[in-house]
Amino acid sequence: MTASTRAPSLLLNPAKYICTRCVYRNSLASLRWSSTEASSPPPLLIKIKADLKAAMRAKDAPRLAVLRGTISEINQLASGDRPVNSDMQILALLKKRKSATEEAAAEAKRVNRPDLQEKEEQQLAVIEEYASSISLMDVAAMRQVVRSEIETLRSSATQDQLKPGMVMKHLLADDGPLGGKALDKAKLAELVREELMSNHQNS
């Protein structure tokens, strides 16, 4: 076969002659772009993962149990509808774990197992350490935001429509003044009720 008869086959089958190195470079560029676009993990999760390595080196059993358990829960939630992407979500997991650990310690005490009780209490101390590392929004600052939001909502809602649930929804929306903030939701709900009551009495 002559060179002139081979030439058309190159044009008809360009896919055979794609540069594999170019494809590889493009794939790497795409991976780097994806990794930079991905949202950064919560600061507390970064700390937990770093502390896990230190706990493994120190063979700190209580800390290892808490950190591994917390990371496992976060990984399980990652594939669901509500992945963990904030310190407040991690705090909620820690509070849940704290409650379960307190119950386990009480049960160990009830059945006269001081060894198990000590184990649970050691883990409880670790849980409290991480839970307390999250600084919650000051109550006075929350109250100011609540008052401001109620004033804003009053311009577009009647007194009867201005209910605690409505105010909370606006406050905690993703684009709301308290959306994603580290705060005590129970305390926030209490402040909303107080301010609505005060607002109603003054109107």
Image (cartoon, rainbow, N blue to C red):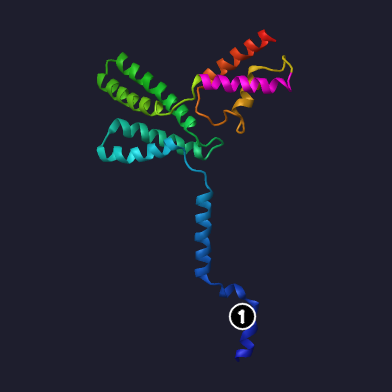
Q: Residue 69, how many percent across, how many down? A: 39, 33
Q: Between 151 and 173, which is closer to the camera in this rendering?
A: 151
Name the quadrant containing residue 96: top left
Q: Is residue 106 above or below residue 183?
A: above
Res. 1 in view: no
Range drawn in magenta: 140-157
Circle 1 residues within 10 Å: few <14, some 14–19, many ≥20: few
Q: Is residue 5 above or below residue 18?
A: below
Amino acid at the residue labelled 1: Leu
Q: Residue at x 61, y 19 (%)?
A: 147
Q: Between 65 and 170, which is closer to the camera in this rendering?
A: 170
Magenta: predominant secondary structure element?
helix
Left or right, 81 with reference to 108: right
Whether 150 is among the magenta residues is yes
Q: Between 162 and 112, which is closer to the camera in this rendering?
A: 162
Outermost residue on the top side: it is 201
Q: Between 180 and 177, which is closer to the camera in this rendering?
A: 177
Q: Residue 187, how many percent across, how many down? A: 52, 18
